[in-house]
Image (cartoon, helix red, strand yellow):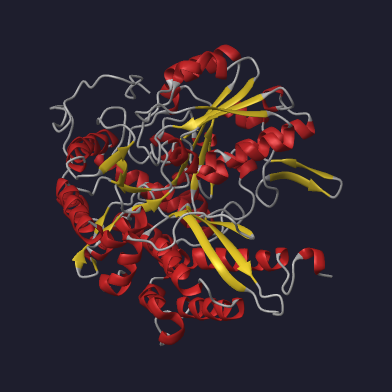
Amino acid sequence: MTTTTTSTSGAPHTPGTAPEHADVPRLDVAAIRADFPIFNRTINGHPLIYLDSGNTSQKPRQVLEVMREHYERHNANVARAVHTLGTEATEAYENARAKVASFIGAAGPAEVVFTKNSSEAINLVAYAFSNATALGGDPRFRLGPGDEVVITEMEHHSNIVPWQLLCQRTGATLRWFSITDEGRLDLSQLEELINERTKIVSYVLMSNILGTINPTEAVVKRARQVGALVMLDASQAVPHLPVNVAELGVDFLAFTGHKMCGPTGIGVLWGRQELLEVMPPFLGGGEMIEVVAMEGSTFAPPPHRFEAGTPPIVQAVGLGAAVDYLSGIGMEAIRQHEKEIAAYALPALETVKGLRVIGPRTPVGRGATISFVLDGVHPHDVGQVLDSLGIAVRVGHHCARPTCVRFGVPATTRASFYLYNTIEDVDALIRGLDHVKRLFG
Amino acid sequence: MQLDALYQDIILDHYKRPHGRGLREPYDAEAHHVNPTCGDEVTLRVRLSSAPDSAEHTITDVSYEGMGCSISQAAASVLYDLLLGKPLTEAMAVHDAFVALMGSRGQLEPDEERLADAVAFAGVSRYPARVKCALLPWMAFKDAAMRAVAAHPTGTKEETDD
């Protein structure tokens, strides 16, 4: 991706001022907010200020209406019914796949596997390794003692635990990149960590806790030199940045629908066609087969090989609608909007006495997901007091405990911004934090 | 919701100036409990004694260290005040009363005589996400106390027991 930065030092933009890009379309945030019915709600007597989109995003009317219409007018199972509704449902499901493929620059819809979430997408790849190992499959997916899997200290648990389990099953060794004090990946060990023994490197494109956007070019180049595969956990990236798999040059990409204005229950594994072709099935069941006999079965080509059972049909359709919605606004405009919010929020937060940002402190190579700790006040208490003011943030270890351990904190408070958030939301957060400090001071 | 019902002054006072905090020697058993959803932790030690002619244990020390929110830390401090010096059976009755209060969703009138400062936690029971915080040290106490009993049979020292 050409837009991520590999710089770990230096600040080309002065914090506090938004970078100027006259050619970037502006978001009409008021119009966007009007698309989201939930902003009509009050919480504890205050207008909702939703700063937890990193956890799950809110849903625009356009997505909800498409899902409702699908249930009301086109509901049937996919890929097996010959009747009209079955045909319509199958078309809607496969159209959603095509929309997703085009959204991320895939070579074609067959490279898009629908899963229930990012975790399942990552597990699918991890199990391709252990199944290929057990069944004597493609050598790129065979793992054993002496082989290595590389992740980072910055991962969500969903990109740690599947690989730990895989290494337990196969005897391979798990290794990881560490994090610098600034919250960037420490790539100084690149040559050593990614070596001839490495079979796959799986890491996060944008950190769910630090907000860091990680470099890809150097990692992909090194992985190619040693013949390792590269997987990106793009759960926090696809909703917020233009992501193009061809430009990234990676092998697998995982993300989830509910963080990008779509419903829960639908995730995506994108994989390069020639890799999906040689991967053994993950879950067995209906839809993923070619011929089933009592003595054994053969399997459908990808992507259906990896979609056992009735899939989350209306959720996929909803994700397609979310892709339409985001495309209509423009991912570049969304990225720019969030960059401006981060550029405003980072210095504003640091005016709060006793507040420490955990993660990059400049709005460069990072998104608008900002974690912080407040002296003497536990994040649980911060979150509770903010909620009493209608402000929703996430508190805890954010399913990234090793990152918290790295920074010596048990938990953080995280404000994550999205296309519907405003500078005024940042101001409300700062006022809320003053309230927190008065109560616990 | 009324924040005051959750953050009563008693709770904030215990949080800001905890009683009995810090791990102390000697002790009979230690328990380390974590709340996996938020990463809060508590380590709690129990020291028991018993008179030579008695079948009853007395809690001679409860010491603790932890990382966590005001609710979990204040709950540990209140636990220390309530249980120190109590016979174990009575301490377990206080434990049970506290657990019942936390499970009450604000529907239970707390037993003030038995729970003293812990009645301030009645408001916490209305916040399901925070009940686990209040219970963390109490669960660690129960665990440590059970182990302490196993390590320290009543009535006598080991050499004269059995």
Q: What residue lies at 44% left-to-right and 67% top-to-bottom?
A: B134
**Residue A278 placement: quadrant:** top right
Residue farthest to the right?
A295
The image quadrant where one finds the N terminus of chain A is top left
Q: What residue lies at 51% left-to-right and 54% top-to-bottom?
A: B23
Q: What residue lies at 51% left-to-right and 60% top-to-bottom?
A: B63
**Left or right: where B103 falls relative to A79:** left
Is A238 in front, or is B110?
Answer: B110
**Residue A44 placement: quadrant:** bottom left
Is A333 in front, or is A158?
Answer: A158
**Left or right: where B105 falls relative to A285:** left
Tell me residue A333's x, y (percent).
23, 36
The image quadrant where one finds the C terminus of chain A is bottom left
**Left or right: where A193 falls relative to A354:** right
Tell me residue A15's x, y (percent).
18, 30
- Count up the numbered dots: 0
Q: Is residue A73 visible?
A: no
**Left or right: where A424 falls relative to A90:** left
User: With respect to residue A184, does A93 lie above or below?
Assistant: below
Tell me residue A237's x, y (percent).
38, 36
**Residue A45 placement: quadrant:** bottom left
Q: Is residue B45 visible?
A: yes
Tell me residue B70's x, y (percent).
36, 61
User: With respect to residue A196, does B127 lie above or below?
Assistant: below
